[in-house]
Image: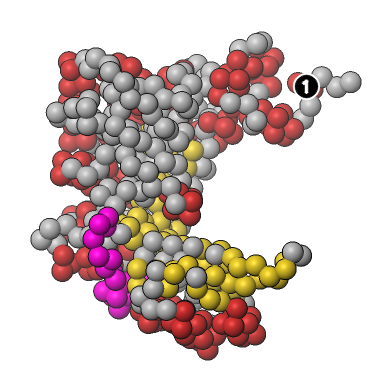
């Protein structure tokens, strides 16, 4: 019988992939041979995506990994997490929540209230993230994990916390944070994507939490925290432009909750930064944005102008995923009505629209305007103001102008009712709230007949 460690690395990676962080760490500690045999699985598990925050500890670790001969080439995605320290911490009103991938969270309807935490411990913690470094190949980590944090009393070390806040401010204002990220991007030969998000826990957050008694916050609904988010955005984009890294994808997805989503005026670059952004790599063709349907006070009339100005920076864009997060307890605003006439993306092939509220007239006009290049559209939790007749008119419009377009519908509504499509299955006729249509004139005709609302 073949021994476990004599199996090919591909099979070992599959087997070890089923272990949790603690089990995988324990396995790697059993012997030098086991550690060597599990190295490919270890690299695949912990280094394809690196989650960092704007702290010296986290960014220096990133630069070390970027220079490592085995770990550096494995990194495909760099995620700048918005976990940060604040000038006046309050352990009674402190948010540290990580929801995972935002588009998946939207599809699953995962929008829980923010967890107030007074602890650094949570159900998904391995408690050993600081050992995941090039020098100590690592015994496990909860970096990037989805968290569900518990609340109980801990003592805040105000001196340690203030020191980390001051260090954070220094590396931002001095340009050191940008220098770290630029150097890392230059050194990562296979980097493909950059993300700005508060959806995953960054490397270093737990270590800082143990050091201070309070983890860095993920909240983005205070004026100073919004300012911090703008700094992260400018630092990241300038580092990408300066490094010359051939990225293909950028996602700015901070904030599942409506009060945390980015207002477009934060995105709009100043004239000085706009000059830097002209050097963004032409390979950057995919953009994901999560923006608030609410404008910053004083910038209400500029919502569409600010957003279209930012999207226009990416001249080679072929794929746009746009989340328009509604405002809780407020009437829904049709932002697409303002945005669609201003937004022209010459090479757009794939469009994703999430959580938006709009009319089919505006949505249809935007789709038809891009008919020369558009190949697929995904609509997730999109609500239209009219009834089922409006959806049928949209399908008929697409049938007339883009019959080969592929349309994916997931959990959309018409006048508050769920849009459904009849489908034949072995057990008879069923109604599905997630379905794909299009590809031919006949397919659109059939879809028009099969959809209804309930």
Report how many numbered discs are placed on residues in the image. 1
As displayed, is residue 128 above or below residue 410? above
Q: How is the image coloured?
A: secondary structure
Residue 208, given in percent of the width and then of the height, sits at: 31, 21
Q: Which residue occupies the extreme right position in the image? A: 1
Q: Which residue occupies the extreme left position in the image? A: 298
Pick whichever, 342 or 362, lies toward us. 362
Residue 9, given in percent of the width and then of the height, sits at: 72, 30
As displayed, is residue 406 above or below residue 295? below
Can residue 178 be seen in this snapshot?
no
Residue 389, given in percent of the width and then of the height, sits at: 46, 83
- The residue singled out by tag 1 in the image is 4
Q: Is residue 52 left or right of residue 309?
A: right
* Residue depicted at 68% across the width and 16% down the height: 34
Q: Is residue 372 left or right of residue 203?
A: right
Question: Most prominent secondary structure in the magenta stretch?
Answer: loop
* Residue depicted at 50% across the width and 82% down the height: 392
Residue 427, given in percent of the width and then of the height, sits at: 74, 64
Characterize the local packing of mark 1: few (<14), some (14-19) or many (20 or more) Cα atoms within 10 angstroms: few
User: Is residue 441 on the magenta stretch?
Assistant: no
Quadrant (top left, top right, bottom left, bottom right) of the N terminus:
top right
Q: Which of the 4 image quadrants contains residue 10?
A: top right
Q: Which residue occupies the extreme bottom position in the image? A: 400
* Residue depicted at 46% across the width and 18% down the height: 128
Local SS, label 1 = helix
Can residue 12 be seen in this snapshot?
yes
Residue numbers of the magenta segment: 327-346
């Amino acid at each position: 019988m073949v021994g476990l460690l004599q199996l090919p690395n591909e099979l070992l990676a599959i087997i070890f992939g089923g272990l949790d962080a603690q089990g995988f760490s324990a396995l790697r500690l059993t012997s030098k041979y086991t550690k060597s045999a599990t190295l490919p699985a270890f690299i695949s598990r912990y280094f394809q995506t690196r989650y960092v925050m704007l702290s010296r500890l986290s960014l220096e670790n990133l630069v070390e990994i970027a220079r490592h001969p085995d770990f550096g080439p494995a990194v495909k995605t760099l995620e700048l997490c918005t976990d940060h320290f604040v000038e006046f911490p309050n352990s009674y009103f402190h948010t540290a929540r990580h929801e995972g991938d935002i588009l998946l969270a939207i599809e699953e309807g995962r929008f829980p209230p923010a967890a107030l935490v007074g602890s650094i411990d949570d159900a998904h913690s391995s408690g050993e993230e600081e050992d995941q470094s090039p020098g100590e190949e690592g015994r496990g980590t909860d970096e990037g994990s989805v968290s569900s944090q518990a609340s109980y009393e801990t003592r805040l070390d105000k001196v340690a916390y203030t020191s980390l806040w001051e260090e954070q401010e220094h590396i931002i204002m001095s340009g050191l944070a940008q220098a770290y990220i630029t150097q890392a991007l230059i050194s990562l030969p296979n980097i493909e994507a950059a993300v700005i998000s508060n959806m995953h826990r960054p490397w270093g957050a737990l270590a800082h939490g143990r050091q201070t008694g309070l983890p860095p916050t993920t909240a983005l609904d205070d004026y100073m925290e919004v300012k911090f988010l703008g700094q992260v955005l400018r630092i990241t984009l300038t580092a990408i432009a300066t490094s010359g890294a051939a990225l293909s994808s950028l996602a700015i997805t901070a904030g599942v909750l409506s009060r945390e989503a980015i207002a477009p005026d934060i995105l709009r670059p100043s004239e000085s930064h706009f000059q830097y952004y002209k050097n963004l790599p032409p390979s950057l063709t995919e953009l994901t944005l999560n923006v608030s349907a609410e404008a910053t006070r004083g910038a209400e009339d500029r919502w569409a102008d600010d957003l279209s100005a930012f999207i226009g920076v990416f001249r080679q864009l072929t794929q746009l995923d746009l989340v328009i997060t509604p405002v809780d307890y407020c009437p829904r605003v049709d932002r697409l009505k303002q945005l669609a006439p201003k937004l022209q993306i010459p090479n757009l092939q794939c469009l994703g629209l999430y959580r938006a509220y709009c009319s089919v007239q505006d949505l249809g006009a935007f789709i038809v305007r891009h008919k020369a290049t558009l190949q697929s559209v995904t609509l997730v939790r999109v609500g239209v103001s009219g009834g089922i007749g409006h959806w049928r008119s949209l399908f008929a419009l697409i049938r007339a102008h883009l019959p080969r377009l592929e349309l994916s519908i997931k959990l959309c509504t018409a006048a508050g009712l769920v849009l459904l499509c009849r489908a034949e299955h072995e057990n008879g006729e069923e109604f599905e709230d997630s379905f794909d249509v299009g590809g031919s004139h006949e397919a659109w005709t059939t879809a028009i007949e099969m959809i209804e609302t309930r």
